[in-house]
Every structure is written in C-alpha cells, then in structure tokens.
C-alpha cells in the first residue's frame, strides 16, 4: 500500500484512515493561520491540512524516505517541507507570531515534543496531536486522578486540554499494540505563573517522583517543607497550588543556602 517502510526506531505507525485524518485536521480552530505538522510520514493527514489553505504551513519530517515520498506526492509543499529533527530545531524562527502544532506524533518522543511545546508556549497557541491513549489520558487528567502527573501540571499551567476521541490500532500501518487518542491543547489566558518556571519544573518532578509519599517527605531532596500542603500528595494539588508550593520552596531553599 505504501512505498515508505515504517521504521521501528523512529516509532512510526502511519495513519491510513482517511476519516480519522480529516477529523484530526478539522480539530484545529477555524481561526488558525499558521501550522507546523510534526512527522507527516506518508502525508495522509498532510493532504487534509493543505486543503485548509493556511497562511503558512510547514511539515517537519526526520525520515529521509518519508520526505522523498512527500516531495513526490505533495509537490505543493515546496519549501514548506523541512527534513530535520523537530526536537533540535529553533521552532520560533519558523513563524512570525503564533502558530499551531499538529501531528500523528511518534509515541517514543511524544513527551519530548510536549516539552518543546512548553518551551515555546508564548508562540504555540494550539496543539492537536495523536498520542498513545495512556499518555493522552494522563495529560488531560484533572487533579485527584491517579493519571494526573508531571505533564498534566506543566501543560495545564498554560493550556486548556480536551480529550477529543479514541483511535483503534487498525487505522495504522503497522498497527500499534495499544489504543491511541487525539487531544487538543488551547492556550489559556495565563501570561505569568507567579513563580520561577525552572523551580516549578523541579518541584513538580520531585513531588511526583515519590507520588505515594506526602509532600513533606517527597520534597526532602529540595528542602524541609512543613507548609499548608505538607500532608497532601502531589496528585491532590492543582496548578495554582503548585505555584504556591513552588514559592514556599523558593524561600526554604534560599534560607538553607544562607546557613
């Protein structure tokens, strides 16, 4: 069916279902003007994105064989097809102003893609992505749920997240051994978190590293925390409470450094 061979080391599972591809493309907001597609593969989703006639459309593909296939079958991409590693690119230089990110993301780097989104949250105003279902559920999980974790907190600080739909393995070549899901992240109104982003990342990672422990115990690698959330576990705190916790840890760390 395809001239391109899916490569296991790249985590490739090519989408073959036209209806799913159309549905993903339509999930981008109507006002979207600039779009970056990550990992277009054989172009099943690319075709529907090109039909939407965005002001600027760029597709980034790391696989040489896929890139050659796309150049042959979608010549209209022209210079909009970049053969590169999205994780190593300067994304902000690709577009003037805000842009959206979309893709059937390779599962082995989906979390890394989201950390790149976080690094560029001022410019990326929307993400529509296909993920392993387990990861999608985790990202969209609210506080108090067992799936709520590091990426949930960090992404929900900047984005409103919707779980759109579940996708069965049969729509891919080769079919993955897990279910997949499409989620949408839309930039919220937050412009400043009110704490150090670097320390927030450290606090969130440390808190969830031993998620069954209370925060008093889980945060001991950073300092002796005895504040209002000391008896709670990481999964019980929402984003704003993590901001409050981060500021408390900032004072504790500074005080211990002075001693």
Image (tube, grey):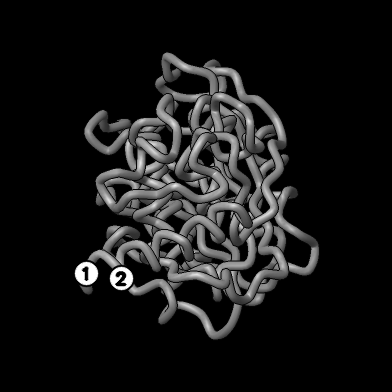
Q: Is residue 238 above or below residue 253?
A: above
Tell me if 17 is positioned left or right of 177 in this view: right
Q: Which residue is mark 2?
A: 254
> Vertically, is 1 above or below 130?
above
Residue 18: x and y, percent?
A: 65, 34
Quadrant containing the C terminus is bottom left
Which quadrant holds residue 164? Answer: top right
Of 80 and 214, nearer the camera is: 214
Q: Are marks 1 and 2 in contact (CB under 8 Å)?
A: yes
- Left or right of 23, for residue 134: left
Residue 52 visible in the current orientation: yes
Q: Quadrant of residue 192?
A: bottom right
User: Where the N terminus falls, by quadrant?
Assistant: top left
- Vertical position of residue 94 compared to residue 148: above or below: below
Relative depth, front residue between 137 and 48? 137
- Residue under the point 40% across and 59% down: 249
Please tell me which residue is depicted at 76% across the width and 59% down the height of the picture.
29
Residue at 63%, 31% in the rendered image: 144
Query: What residue occupies the far bottom of the structure in this picture?
Result: 96
Q: Which mark is residue 257?
A: 1
SS state under label 2: helix
């Amino acid at each position: 069916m395809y001239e391109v061979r899916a490569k296991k080391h790249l985590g490739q599972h090519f989408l073959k279902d036209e209806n799913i591809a159309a549905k993903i493309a339509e999930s981008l907001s109507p006002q979207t003007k600039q779009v970056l597609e990550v990992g277009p593969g054989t172009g099943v989703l690319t075709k529907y994105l090109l039909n939407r006639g965005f002001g600027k459309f760029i597709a980034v593909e790391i696989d040489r064989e896929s890139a050659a296939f796309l150049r042959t079958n979608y010549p209209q991409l022209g210079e909009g097809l970049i053969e590169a590693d999205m994780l190593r690119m300067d994304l902000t230089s690709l577009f003037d102003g805000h842009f959206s990110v979309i893709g059937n993301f390779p599962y082995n780097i989906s979390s890394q893609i989201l950390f790149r989104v976080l690094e560029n949250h001022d410019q990326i105003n929307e993400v529509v992505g296909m993920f392993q279902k387990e990861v999608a559920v985790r990202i969209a999980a609210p506080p108090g749920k067992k799936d709520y974790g590091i990426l949930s907190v960090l992404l929900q600080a900047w984005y409103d997240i919707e779980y759109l739909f579940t996708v069965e393995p049969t729509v891919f070549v080769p079919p993955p051994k897990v279910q997949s899901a499409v989620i949408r992240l839309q930039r919220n109104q937050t412009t400043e978190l009110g704490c150090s982003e670097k320390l927030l990342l450290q606090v969130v990672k440390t808190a969830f590293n031993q998620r069954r422990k209370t925060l008093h115990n889980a945060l001991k690698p950073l300092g002796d925390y005895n504040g209002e959330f000391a008896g709670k576990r990481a999964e019980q705190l929402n984003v704003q409470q993590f901001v409050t916790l981060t500021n408390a840890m900032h004072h504790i760390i500074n005080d211990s450094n002075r001693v």
